[in-house]
Image: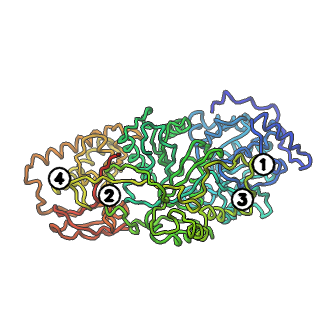
Amino acid sequence: MPLANAPPPPEARPKAKIYPRETIDVTELKRRAVEVLGVVPFQWQLDAAVAILCGEDVILDVGTGSGKSLCFVLALLFSTTDVAITVMPLTALMLEQAQNAKIPTIAICAETIAAVGREKLFEAAAAGAYRHILCSPELFATLEFKQGVVNKLADCLRVVNFDEGHLMTEWGTTFRSEYRTLGNVRGLVPSCVPVMPVSATWSADVLDDVMKLLGLPPTTRRIEITNARPNVALSIRQMKFEERSMADLRFLIPVGARKPEDIPITLVYTNERLKAERACERLKQWCTDEGIEDPEDGACVAFYHAKVGPQRKRELERQQAESKARIWCCTDAAGLGCNMRNVARVVLWEMPPSFCALVQRAGRAARDLNTLGEAILIVTAAYINKGKKELESITAHTVEGAAHVNSAPGDDVDELSDGVDVAEGRQRVLVQEGGVREGNESDEGDGDGGDEDGPKKRVKRGKKKHVWDEFFGNAQKTQLQHGVNTIWKPQEGQRCCYRCSPTRFPIEKIVLDKMQGLKRGRKKEFPVRLTHMLRRDLGKWRAILAEELYPGIEGVTGETVLGDDVIEQLATFGDRIDTVDLLRKCTRWFLAYANDERKVLTVAGQALLTKLRRIYDEFDALGPDALSTGPGIPASLFYGPSTRGGSGGPGSRGTTVPAARGGRGGRGRGTGTRSAGRGNDSGTKSTRGKQGRTRRK
């Protein structure tokens, strides 16, 4: 944020005053909110501000999109010099808050530090140029920030807010340990300064942990409003195709879509960055198949995760705000706390790592409470085929206090596509009348909702939203009332979940048109001799490449720049790679591409294509004899198939030796799916199910 636009610091800064409750004019506070912030606060927001003005700690437990962020600054309106510090988890969230602020606000993060300079930012913040300071937990916990900013603002510091406070437990015990150090806040700020942890997903266990971490007594003031999202319909869909194919996402491109605007704005959440990228590639291909042109290249369908560069992130966020981005394939780095009010649909690809994560992701649909949205959980067949009652018991176990619900391992998956892998194929979508998102025909209660026994069975199993409500204790919290504590009101066409009204959740049928020439469980393969040449020659060439890219630098080896896994992908791809499109389909080698879109090759990427062409030419020069297997072909690393014949994932990496013609292949050993299967004509293992190609009628 440019410093030039900041107001000059006041000559004198009086201390932040602790007000007796009876002296606070709530009507005046409400008037100032309208005048300065342009909003009429609800009573619960005023209650939070009054408690802070009285010097009381506050726990804010309010649902997504309800207006929690107003509470960060509402108490500041009673003075012209009070300052609030808010600790936020993500740069995008900080920048959004700063850009849309109605009072002087600055985000002190890596991007603003790079643009302005740490020293200048600290000086401006400490001088009182900003009323609201946003920072990350990593920065807040540093001695430099304490001495350069906090100590100098001690007298006028009104409150320290902790946005997405549940992350102190969920992230603080894993990959962002600095979140745990936030418990030292009492030693960083004057004892009279109240703190306010805020979240839409306080579970009992997490809240207890955070209260202990921050030293908050059981008598701490709590403002609790149900986090129920009645404007978001919930449903579960069972994967019909092998997970790696992403074919079950094909329904996201609607029947008859001809332009980006025909695609509902959707967030597709995955648990891994590479899965987000893979889903993005498939969806882009399906858009191309349907003739949907992207007027702003890379906007219609894109991926977003922590490793996307800052410049690209800001570009993506702009496209999303302008509704040019129709589908984001993303991780939790996207949307956490951000005011993305145009998202109509959220898809959760596989079970999230925790129930809180599930609710956080689902809650990003229809953040504008005057609109209707949908959240769809797509899980492996294991979750469905174990029985719906067991599925609900898993969720119930989470409600009783389990911290995490993990996805089932891949070797439990039933291949409902009958062993057909459609990773390289195309799918078309038909809308099936009736049906439910689960798509499990064995459940009689989820059919057409007959009058006799359908309702009884649905009552027995209960609404899916009951699990949500029970987990967060919503029955004991203040309920939503239009005009009193929320802008939400019941709307025509509103749906609850597929348990309540299964016929209102029709499932789109994905139809596979099979390609000729490949037998089930088989994929296109190079001749064994060519595969051997690719492994051997690329293994030698990578040392030369390393020296060319990093001359004279010790420790940078060929294996560093071109790993064995990339060589294996290139050697077993099955198609000769001579274009950037084919290279992108084959591998995500980090040195090959000039940007996140992977449409432009670097010097290293061009060199790789040149090397591959030379190897192909050398193989062709060998003549017909090159097609024989011959002795001495070494054992190969492979990604084996699942037990049903579909393509496995990286977890199933094993070692096998060539099988005899038509014989049974070796059994792979690894942490993932089993790799048993039949040997093929060339004596090597088939590692993928049948490819498919489809068309839209």
Q: How is the image coloured?
A: rainbow
- Residue 448 drawn at (x, y percent): 51, 62
Q: Which residue is mark 4?
A: 530
Q: Earlier in the sequence, mark 2 or mark 1?
A: 2
Distance between mark 1 and mark 4 Cα atoms: 72 Å
- Residue 387 image point, x, y percent: 48, 71
Seen at 65% across and 57% down, the residue is 201
Q: Is residue 115 above or below residue 637?
A: above
| Residue at 44% across, 54% down | 432
* Three-letter residue code for mark 3: Leu
Amino acid type of disc 2? Asp
Q: Secondary structure at mark 4?
A: helix
The answer to the question of whether label 1 and label 4 lie on touching residues, with beta carbons closer than 8 A, is no
Identity of the residue drawn at 73% across and 35% down: 103
1 or 3: tag closer to the N-terminus: 3
Of tags 1 and 3, which is closer to the observer?
Answer: 1
Mark 2 or mark 4: which comes first in sequence?
A: 2
Point out the tag, 1 or 4, that comes first from the N-terminus: 1
Up/down of 439 relative to 580, above or below: below
* Amino acid carrying mark 1 in the image: Val
Q: What residue does disc 3 label?
A: 214
- Using the rendered view, name the quadrant where residue 410 is placed: bottom left
- Tags 1 and 3 in contact by the CB under 8 Å rule? no
Taking the image as shown, residue 15 lies to the left or right of residue 66, namely right
Q: Marks 4 and 3: which is nearer the front?
A: 4
- The residue that disc 2 covers is 421
Q: Position of residue 209 (x, y in %)?
A: 67, 64
Q: Residue at x 44, y 36 (%)?
A: 259
